[in-house]
Image (cartoon, rainbow, N blue to C red):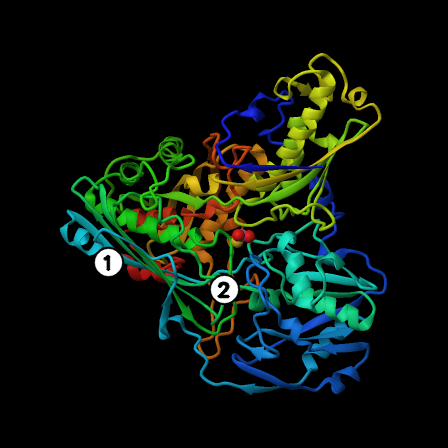
Amino acid sequence: MTVHFKQDKPEQSNRLDGMKQGVLGKGVSRLEGLAKVTGTAPYAAEYPVEGCAEGVLVTSTITRGEVVGLDKDAVLAMPGVLAVIDDSRLTTRPAQGTANEAPKQGPKTISYWGQPIALVVAETFEQARDAAKHLTVKYREEEGAPVDPQAVETEEKDGTVRQGDLAHAMAEAAHSVDVTFTTRGHASAAMEPHAAIAEWDGDKLTVHASLQMLNYNISELADALGVEEDDVRLISRFVGGGFGSKLGISEEVVAAAIAAKDLARPVRVVMSRQQVFQCIMRRSETTQRLRLAADEDGKLTGFGHHAVVSNLPGEVFAEPVLQSSHFLYSGENRELMLEVARIHRMTAGSVRAPGEAVGMPALEGAMDVLAEKVGIDPVELRLKNIPEQDPEEGLPFSSNKLAECLKQGAEAFGWDSGPRKPRQHQDGEWWVGTGMASAARAHSISEARAKVTLKSDGTALVETDMTDIGTGTYTILAQIAGEMLGLEPNKVLVELGDTRHPRGSGSGGSWGAASTGSAVYVACKAIREDLAARVGVEETALELSQGKTSAGKSLIDLLGGEDIAREGHYEPGDIKDDYTAAGFGAFFAQVRVNRYTGETRVDRMLGAFGFGRVLNHKTARSQCLGGITWSIGVALTEALEFDPRDGHLVNCDLAEYHVPVNRDVPELDVLMVEERDAAASPIQAKGIGELGMCGGAAAIANAIYNASGARIFDYPMTPDHVLKAMPD
Ligand code: MOS
C-alpha cells in the first residue's frame, strides 16, 4: 500500500522529537562500515560475474570533427580480442542526470579531445587495453575549435536580475568595492573510477554500475539503448564517491550494455583514472565581477555579481555561480547575471557543490575587501547585512541560522573582533593571520519513495533505489525508521541502490537525506497508524521503544505473525515555492604564509553550520569535515590545466591534480548549530553534504591577506600568486 504525502505547509508538530527510541541524531557508526573497511562491500567492478569479458574505451585524439574510419580488422586479429564496438549509441551522453534527454552527440561526431568513440572488448583486461592502444582511428578534423573561454563571445543565461539602479548606488556609495575574481576548473575526483558490468538475460538487462541517481539513470540508460525501462535493472549498492560525476550515466555504462548484447556474454568496462578525468566532466572555470555598494556603516545598498562560465556548445548546464548570491545579503539595488562561453573542452557539469563552491569564495572575498574599507569587523559586516527575507523574491526564509553561526563560530574559534590590519603577527619566516567567511548553499528537496516493512519477527526492512555515495544514507535511514518504530538501528535492514526497489531521490545536490528520509518517515507513520489501531490509541499517542509499546506489549505480539508493509511517497508541495530555503554557516581560518616562498599552510579551521535537524551527529560531522577539506582544495591546490592548443586536460590523475592530502589538512572543528527547519522537509532536515565547501576558501584567502598583506583575486592561491601579491 502506498501512502502519498505532499508537503504544502511547514511541519510544526516536531513528531520526531516526541519519539521514544532516542536514536535519531545520535552519532551511530555506519552500519555498512565494517563491510567497507574489511573490503567485503563490493563496488561496481567487483561483482563476481561468470564469463565476464573486459572492455576498454578508446577516446578521441582530436578536438572537433568526425570519426570516418576505424581499422577494426587489425585489432580483431590481436590475441583475445572479441569485438570493436563503435555504435553511435555509445557516445550518448544524457547531461547531468536531470532529465531524459535525447542523445547529445550525433553519430560519431567529436566535440572534445578525450571523448569516447569506441570500445574494444577482449578476454582479459590487458588484451583489451593493448588492442585499444593499437586501434587506428581515421578522423575528419575541423580545425580551429575554440578552447579558450576568454577568446569567445558569451551567451547570457536566463535568470538575470536587475532591481533598482546598481550603477547609481555604486556612484553614491560611501564605500564601494568593484573586484574581479577568477576560479579554475575542478574535477570531482571520486576515489572509485567509473565502472559497469552489464549482463543480458534475453531482453532483460542488469547493470552493476557506480551511479548517484538510479531513479534517473534507469531512464537515461533505457533511452540511450532504445529499450524499455522495465527491461533494465541498475544496481549501485556501494559507491566510492560521486561528487557530481555520477549524477548521470556515462559512456562506460552504455558501452558495456551494447557490448554485452552483441557478444551475448557479460562485459565489464572500467574507466582508467585518466579517462575519468578527461571525459567524465569538469567544473567550469569562472570569472566573477563583484560590485558592492555600502553606506557609511557598511549596510549594503547595492549588490552586483556577474559571472562567466563555460561549457560545450548545446549543453544546458551552466555552473550556477549566483545561486546563493540571490538571497544571502541585503542591498536593494541589484544586478546578477550569468553568462556562458561555448568552448570545446570536455562537458562542464556538477562537481561538488556546483555554484556556491566557487561563487561563495568570490563573494566572500569581496566582502572582506568591503569590511576593510568600511573599517569594521568582517563578522559585523555580515551580521549587518542579513536580510529579513529573500531580497529578490520577497519570500520568507524557511530558517536562517547565519547570525547564530557567525556568532557561535567566532566565539568558539576565538575570533579577534574589531577592524583588522594585515601583517600583525610573525613567527620566524611565517606571517600568521586569520580570516572568516559566510557559508551558504541552496536547499534542494525532491520527490522520493521508500518501502518500509515491519516484519513479524520485530525487525524492519527499508527498501529504496536511493544510493549511499559515502554519505551515510544506510545509517540515517535506519535511524529514522528505528526512531519511528521503536527499534535499534541494527534491527533495521536498509537495502539501497537497486532499481527493483521504489524510486528514491538519488544522491545529489545534498537532497538525499531530507528527501528519501522523508519518504521513510511517511511510510513509518502509516505503519504506526496500523499499530496504534491494534493497541487502541491515536497514532500520536503511540510510544514505541526497544520493540515494545509503553505498556510493555511487544511488537512481535502486536504483529501476530504478520508483516506490515507501506510504501512512503513524499513530494514537496507548496513549501518549495513559498520559502527560500538554504543551509547557512560561517568559516574561520588561521593560516601562515611564508614570507620568502609564498607557501600557505592552514593552521586550524572551524566551520559552524545550521542545516536543520541533525540526523546523525557523526556522519553529519564527517560531511562537514569533508566539505571544509574540499574548501582547502579550492583555496590552495585544485586547478584543472588545459592544453591551449587542443583543449585537452593535462593533469589527469591524482598525482598531478592536487586535492588536499593529510599534510594539507590541519585540525578542523565543526560546530553544528541545531535547529528544526519546519519548511524544509517533514523531518525538518536540510542537506549538509555540500555546505561545508561553500565559502570556506574565502576564509583562507582572507586569512592570507590578514597574515601577509597579499590580496589575491585568483583561486587557487598557489605560492606564485601569493609571492606576486605580497607587499615589498
Ligand atoms: Mo552533486 S555535485 O549535485 O552530486
Mark closer to the observer (2, 1):
2
Q: Splitting the image into 4 quarters, where does residue 530 fall?
A: top right
Q: Circle 1 is placed at which residue position?
A: 728
- Provide residue 14's location: percent of width, then percent of height: 53, 25
Is ligand 1 within 8 Å of the beta carbon of the residue shown at mark 2?
no
- Identify the secondary structure beneath mark 1: loop
Distance Cα–Cα, label 2 vs label 1: 39 Å
**Position of residue 639 in the picture relative to residue 154 (left or right):** right
For disc 2, the marked residue is 348
Q: Quadrant of the N terminus?
A: top right
Tell me if mark 2 has few (under 14), some (14-19) or many (20+) residues whose alpha carbon lies within 10 angstroms of its own. many
Measured as percent of width and height from the top left, residue 85 is found at 72, 76
Secondary structure found at label 2: loop
Estimate how packed mark 1 is, as few (under 14), some (14 to 19) or many (20 or more) residues with alpha carbons within 10 Å.
few
Residue found at the far top of this picture: 551
Amino acid at the residue labelled 1:
Asp
* Depth check, front residue: 694 or 544: 544
User: Would residue 577 be seen by someone viewing this image from the given angle?
Assistant: yes
Q: Position of residue 229 (x, y in %)?
A: 71, 58
**The quadrant where residue 485 appears:** top right
Type of amino acid at the residue the image marks with label 2: Ala
Q: Residue at x 59, y 78 (%)?
A: 60
In-image side of 719 versus 423 (left or right): right
- Looking at the image, tell me whether mark 2 or mark 1 is earlier in sequence order: 2
Q: Nearer the viewer, residue 504 or 530?
A: 530
The C terminus, quarter of image: bottom left
Residue depicted at x 72% and y 46%:
501
